[in-house]
Each structure stands twice: as C-alpha cells, then as structure tokens.
Amino acid sequence: MPAAPKINRRSVAYDVPAALAHLAAADAKLARLIEQAGPFTLKLKHQHSPFEALLESIIYQQIHGKAAAAILRRLIEAFGDVHPQPRQIIAAPDHVLRGAGLSGAKALAIRDLAAKTLDGTVPTLAQIRRLPDDEIITRLTAVRGIGPWTVEMLLIFRLGRPDVFPVTDYGVRKGFLLTFGRPPKTRPITPAMLPKTDAMLRRAKKWQPYRSVASWYLWRACDLART
C-alpha cells in the first residue's frame, strides 16, 4: 500500500493577535476560555479546488474516518491514482463509483457535484476566493448532499474565513454550554441541554468579525472538559 500523502497546511491570512484581542475585550468569559485553551493553532488544510474538497466531504459524511479514507483511496486508484475531475465522474459507469465503496446516494451526490461544477454553480478555486461567505453557502448547498454545515467547515478549515459561526455543530453548541451556560456536574450533557440557535447568535454578535476564531475555542472547551 502506498504511503499516505503528506498533508500541506498553511496559516490563516487574517490577523490572529488582533482577533484574540478583540474577542477578549468583547467577552470576559470567552477571554477566560482563550487563556485556558492557549494559543490559536488552526492551520488550513491543503486548498483543493471546491470540487475536490466537496467530493471528499461527501465521501466522509456519516462514516468512520478510516472507512472514508479507504473509499477515497480506491476512488483515486480507479482514475489512475489522480483525483478524479468533474468530466471523469460524469462519464464513469456506476460500477466504478460503487466499486470504490460509494453508496448509491453518495454516487448520485458526487455526480450532481460534478454537473454543478461544469455548469458553474460550484465555483473554481480562483472564483471562490473572491466570493462572500453567504454566496458560497447559497451556491454550494445547491449540490445534492451538501448542507450549510459542510460549507461552513470548508469556509473555516479550507478557505480560512474569519467570521463563520456554525451554530448547528454539536461541538460548538456543547462548547457554548460549557463556557457560558450551566452544564451538569454529575450527569452527561444531552442534546436537550444544548443552547438554542437564537441565544448563540445574540451573544456571538459581539464576536464579529472573528466568529471562526471563537468557534475554534468553543471546540477547545470540549477538549478541556474531557481532560
């Protein structure tokens, strides 16, 4: 089996010290979390084209990471050890996609992604860098199987956008409860205990324009609670 490819990562383009200073001044409780969690160490994943990044996101949805990685590897091998491109996906027989381990629903989603890349709904990498967050979300969620959360993760971890707040993310909601709410001390946290979207958005207004950084620290709050 070939060695796993080295993952190239790069720093975000926005001013991290300015972001941390803004968040700490805006919210005392968030300032305490930042102090407890330590430096902001987010590094962006290798910047594939939007098509390639979303293809991988579809594969990874709702299955274990190792199983998804195996499916992605088999799919790449089926196209000559290179990441398949939209026209190749459109032209591929069903047995090639299913043979890599894709479910019927995911095969349909990947074909729709390819079609919407070719018709321009899914922008190129050069185009997406110039688009505002809201337009990116609108255009990419037009693809079968792609919801707002998937696009928000792309915005934060691939494009390095500074002001994204994924309020439906379980870790962000749990971190919000741990930081600003009253989590139970002797019982596990259940979904019913998690904060409502409107309450999260109200508090997060003062974090703008650095809600991505705040979200990263809310994920760290979950890590701190485990340790």
Image (cartoon, helix red, strand yellow):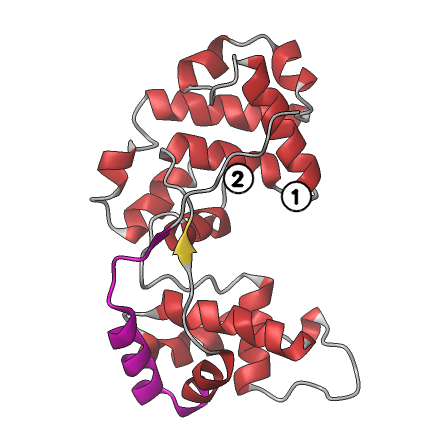
For the point 46% across and 12% down, the residue is 88
- Residue found 25% across the figure and 57% down from its top: 13
What range of the chain is rendered magenta?
Answer: 10-29
Q: Residue at x 59, y 34 (%)?
A: 59
Q: Which residue lies furthest to the left in this view?
A: 130
Say the numbered circle drawn on residue 57. Answer: 2
Q: Residues within 10 Å of mark 2 (few under 14, many from 20)?
A: some
Total labels drawn? 2
Q: Is residue 144 at all visible to an observer of this figure?
A: no
Q: Residue at x 28, y 75 (%)?
A: 17
Quadrant containing the C terminus is bottom right
Of 204 and 28, the residue lying toward us: 28
| Three-letter residue code for mark 2 | Ser
Image location (x, y in percent) of residue 133: 30, 52
- In the rendered image, which residue does mark 1 sit on? 65
Is disc 2 placed on a helix, strand or loop?
helix
